Amino acid sequence: MSDNFGGGYKITPQIQGTLSPINDRVIVKNMHFGEQKTSGGLIISNDDGTTRGIYPRWGQVHKKGPRNEENYGPGDWVLVEHGRWTRAVKIDEGEGEMELRMVEAESILAMSSEKPEGVRIGAEYGDGEHATIDPAAFVNG
């Protein structure tokens, strides 16, 4: 989610260096806000910012604060209560550019050591040329 300025321009802050969460906060990456595809093959359009877009989202733990004693750590996936994350900050900590968001520990609803497979994200279902399923696949011959 980026700040929206007049004329539709969106700006995501970019910083250099490292981010460290304080207290029991959690920094997450790989939260998805765009078009998605269910495991059954249905495409769900980008609904962020609409009433239908109100649901918890999965994010991958990047770092957690020193007072966070919960049973998850970097690399684990956490389900975050809707809207309980900050705007993204782009940063390169030597692993390539990432979008990071801060989450409060009490807003985490569940965790998984493996990437959740209920909804597959982005390019995972693309063929390199198309970002979605070919509409011709739905036409009866």
Image: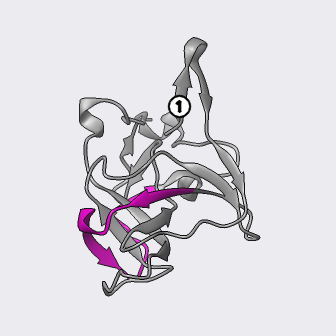
Residue in front for this viewpoint, 24 or 79? 24
Asked if the magenta segment contains residue 110, the reply would be: yes
Q: Residue at x 39, y 73 (%)?
A: 23
Residue in front for this viewpoint, 127 or 24? 24
For label 1, the residue is 3
Here the colouring is one colour
Q: Position of residue 29 (x, y in %)?
A: 52, 62
Q: Position of residue 132 (x, y in %)?
A: 53, 42
Crowding near the residue tagged with mark 1, few <14, some 14–19, many ≥20 C-alpha atoms within 10 Å:
few
Residue in front for this viewpoint, 105 or 81? 105
Residue in front for this viewpoint, 82 or 86? 86
Judge from the rendering whether residue 112 lies leftward or rightward of residue 31; answer left or right.
left
Q: Position of residue 140 (x, y in %)?
A: 40, 35
Q: Image quarter for residue 71?
A: bottom left
Q: Residue at x 66, y 67 (%)?
A: 18
Q: Is residue 104 above or below residue 10?
A: below
Q: Image quarter for residue 112?
A: bottom left
Asked if the magenta segment contains residue 5, the reply would be: no
What span is in magenta?
100-120
